[in-house]
Every structure is written in structure tokens, then in C-alpha cells.
Amino acid sequence: NAGVTQTPKFQVLKTGQSMTLQCAQDMNHNSMYWYRQDPGMGLRLIYYSASEGTTDKGEVPNGYNVSRLNKREFSLRLESAAPSQTSVYFCASSEPTGRTEAFFGQGTRLTVV
Amino acid sequence: GESVGLHLPTLSVQEGDNSIINCAYSNSASDYFIWYKQESGKGPQFIIDIRSNMDKRQGQRVTVLLNKTVKHLSLQIAATQPGDSAVYFCAENTNYGGSQGNLIFGKGTKLSVKP
């Protein structure tokens, strides 16, 4: 049982480049999330998807887009990377009520130079 | 405990002692809370949760206390071990745009256990 799988684990981008972070879960969860974590900080919600076909902005959505491809997969896209987007990105999934734990992937460490 | 500053609060304890990590949450309407443990280079892992209709919940070596009056959450770890060294986050379930199901995380506390 893999849980939540993120790819890639590490990535270096030049300013202005684009990339997509992939996330897949095998727990049949309806809700999926993208967070970013900056040094010495907690996790901040970028976007979430309460169910297949729906997405909504979180606390820090600017500069990002998401796609809920199907129930299993939720991708995060940076159209034009900026140094301020250097961070560790975590994908998570949970049951839709939010009143159960969220399961996290191992993270993607992104550096924008 | 939790801090709104840029520096991660650190709690240093001796192996075998009890640890208490504190968290102030923001939304009085939040009805579900979780404590997560994050080891270096890994994603957060669930430790224990509590619903707002409770004020205390116990797990294996961990206890969470909830004080809704002052919007305060604490995590107590009994007989702290070196393997407990990690960053601990509290998270509250709150609403975004009317849609429930989103966890908002605190800044985290780094626990260091001295052997």
C-alpha cells in the first residue's frame, strides 16, 4: 500500500520555467490537497479538491494551477516559476469531511534559481 | 510552543522526561484538531486527533488536551525517547469558502531529545 506518492522528489528550475508536480493516492480518498512548506514554517494550503472534478483555492494560490485528473491524481502546475516558489511541496489526501486525518506524501523539494 | 514568528520554537528535553508541546489555534469554529509529527526529509505523520466535543484524548504515550475557552491545544508525550525528536505541528479543521475539509497548520515546534 503506497499511500500518497509524489513525483519528482527534487527539482531545480530556472526563473520563468514551468513544471507540473504529480500526486497520486491509492486509498480511494475523495479529498486531495497541495501544501507548501517554507523553512521554519508550518504547511500552507495552496489548493484543494474536495472531490473529483472540483478544485478550490487555499491560502496561497497565486502562481499555481491544479488539475484533478481523476479520483487518484491531483497535479500542481507552476506556469512561470519564481524564486519565491522555492519550497517543499506536499500533497495529501483524506476523507471529504475533513474530520479525519490527512495522509501526506514524502514531498517535492523545489528550488527556483 | 507555537509561535507566529519566523523562528521555529524548540523544546529540548532529557530522554525519559515528559514533553509538553503547546499550540494556539485561530478559529473558534474549528471542530477537529490533529497533531502531526514530521521527521527530517519526510512528510507529516498523524499522531493523534481530538474533536471539539472532547477536552482530552489519550493514545499510546501521547495525550492531547483541548481548551476551547482560550483556543489552546497541547500534546503531552510521556517518557520521551530519542525517536520522538522531530517537528510537531498542530492542525485545525476550518472552512475555506464555505467548504469544509481543510486543515490549517500551526508553525510547528521542534522537539530535541537528549540521550
Image (spheres, coloured by chain):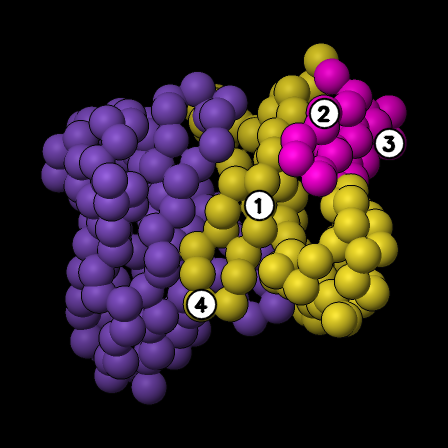
Pointer 2 residue: B57
Task: Pinpoint the chain carrying mark 1.
Answer: B
Q: Which chain is yellow?
A: B
Task: Pinpoint the chain carrying mark 2.
Answer: B
Contact, mark 2 vs mark 1 (Cβ under 8 Å): no
Say few, some or many: other residues with alpha carbon within 10 Å of mark 1 (under 14 / 14 to 19 / 20 or more). many
Q: CA distance from mark 1 to mark 4?
A: 14 Å
Span shown in magenta: B54-75
Q: Inspect the image, locate mark 3, and give the three-letter code of the amino acid beneath it.
A: Val
Q: Inspect the image, locate mark 2, and give the three-letter code of the amino acid beneath it.
A: Arg
Q: CA distance from mark 2 to mark 3?
A: 18 Å
Considering only order in the chain, which callout, 4 or 2, is on the residue closer to the N terminus?
Answer: 4
Pointer 1 residue: B36
Q: Residue at x 44, y 67 (%)?
A: B41
Say few, some or many: other residues with alpha carbon within 10 Å of mark 4 (under 14 / 14 to 19 / 20 or more). few
Considering only order in the chain, which callout, 3 or 2, is on the residue closer to the N terminus?
Answer: 2
Q: Is residue B23 visible?
A: no
Display colour for chain A: purple
- The picture places residue B34, in percent across and down from the top left corner, at 60, 35
Pointer 3 residue: B70
Image height of A82 relative to A3, above or below:
below
Considering only order in the chain, which callout, 3 or 4, is on the residue closer to the N terminus?
Answer: 4
Identify the mark at residue B41; answer none if there is no mark.
4
